[in-house]
Amino acid sequence: MDSRVFDGLGIPTRLFLDGPLSLHMHSVGEGLNLASAGFTADLTKARLMSPGTQWVKPAGQPGAAGFTLKRRPDGGYDITGLEASTQGFALNADFSIAPRGGLQSAHIYRASMDGLFDFTASIKRDSDGAFLVNSTAKALDARGFVRGLARGVGNTVDIGVRAHVDFDRALVSDRMTLTDGVLDFKKSTQQIKNMDFHANTPNGKAVITIGKDALGKHRIMAQTDDAGMVIEALFGLSRIHGGHLQIDGVLGDGKTQTTKVLLTMTDFKLGNVPVMAKILSLGSLTGIADSMNGEGLGFRKLVAPLEFDHGILKIGKSRATGPALGITASGTVDLVGKTMSLSGALAPSYTLNSILGNIPVLGNVLVSRKGEGVIGVSYRVKGPYDALEVVVNPLSALTPGVLRRIFEGSNGNAGAHEADSNNGTGKTSQPGSKKDGKTSSAKVPKREAGANSNSETNKPN
């Protein structure tokens, strides 16, 4: 038998079976009306693999499987004594199939696959069709699951689930393993209803709770002492180091309610980010750019209101402040189309700038946005992740905050594009632009450019 035979029986096996296997059956019954049957299979000639092929049994490696099938009086079937084993994989379980088909219950005494999982589980289906799951895991590779949550594909199965999971170790990124974790989870066919999760991180803890508030909305609260590692696990971004992360907001319902959260992060460092380095370079802030490329730029606090709407990330008036630099940003990121349009301002020597900005009355004129300082440059970043166009307007340097708003208010930003970069009135970086004395040409490196960049731009004439 091979995967083509299983295709004919309506059993999808191509994701994990390739090649032939020999099957022996001993049955009791009349004709095809089986009362019971015993099956044994030799898996040696077959190639077995996990989804994603993280684990593979090559053809020629010994392997065997066997189980007993019995029909119950209600018309359902019990699969008992299921055992399958080969190097790097073992399964021992019993299953019950409902009279009309579909899983009714399961007892997984052990399921293990090298590098991916090692767990036991009990599964039952209640009267409303939801699965009740109780599981204990020694080890889990949850990298794909966690990344799927960030992409919005973690809730695509239209099945209700109520689960309790204890785990010793869960790998959530190449650099981060959670330990001693507990997950209580309730999901309807449409959305997550409740969740309580806590685990130890390398430098502290991670906690996530989801539940209804007084208005009936599903509120999410999360915090961790390993902000950089958690962001890397979710989004694959490795430029943030350390930090404490807190998220508070409301989950969307997939219909009229979008997901809105307030993200706060404290005491972290930002490493080498190509787009940020280009903005600093065009703004003649090369010293700060060098610091970022070295040990990283330190920030005391980041506050960012975020909204997720059908693949679009909307960033509200956000700000990050540190001893050497203050940053503001707002705009949109298309997570599906992999494009962005963001704008904001940079204020070097942020501590000194803040002191000047706190002068009564005069400070309100000098600084018109929280997070900015007296001395600063405005920037815009726009385009696809791998070909971002960057515009920096040094015309706003040494310019009071009220006047800076006037310069930023020009839609065409013509002054920034038409003036000679050497006279301090404007610099532009975009793929394919010419070095004619009016613009500087540079392409943002492709690696993580989109994920770590900021804002909108206009093409030079």
Image (cartoon, rainbow, N blue to C red):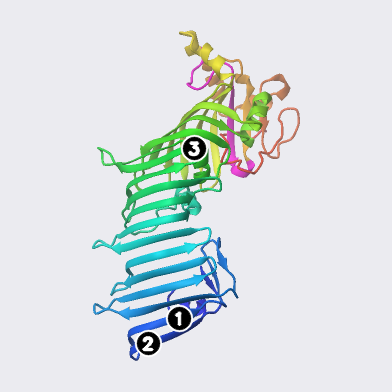
| In the foreground, 165 or 459 | 165
Query: Residue 330 in the image: x percent, y percent?
Result: 50, 32
Query: In the rendering, which numbered label is found on residue 296?
Result: none
Mark 1: amino acid? Thr
Magenta stretch: residue 151 in it? no
Query: Residue 243 in the image: x percent, y percent?
Result: 50, 33
The boundaries of the magenta stretch are 366-387
Which residue is identified by label 1?
Answer: 40
Q: Residues within 10 Å of mark 2 (few under 14, many from 20)?
A: some
* Residue at 38% across, 58% down: 157
Mark 3: amino acid? Asn
| In the foreground, 199 or 460 | 199
Side of 36 where 58 appears, left or right: right
Q: What is the CA distance from the residue labelled 1 to the residue labelled 3?
A: 49 Å
Q: In the rendered structure, are the residues bearing label 1 and label 3 in contact, judged by CB atoms less than 8 Å apart? A: no
Q: Is residue 12 visible?
A: no
Give the vertical position of 33 relative to 371 (above or below): below
Q: In the rendered structure, are the residues bearing label 1 and label 2 in contact, judged by CB atoms less than 8 Å apart? A: no
The answer to which quarter of the image holds residue 425 is top right
* Residue at 42% across, 59% down: 119
Q: Quadrant of the C terminus?
A: top right
* Residue at 38% across, 36% down: 248
Which residue is identified by label 3?
Answer: 203
Q: Residues within 10 Å of mark 3 (few under 14, many from 20)?
A: few
Q: Is residue 367 visible?
A: yes
Q: Secondary structure at mark 1?
A: strand
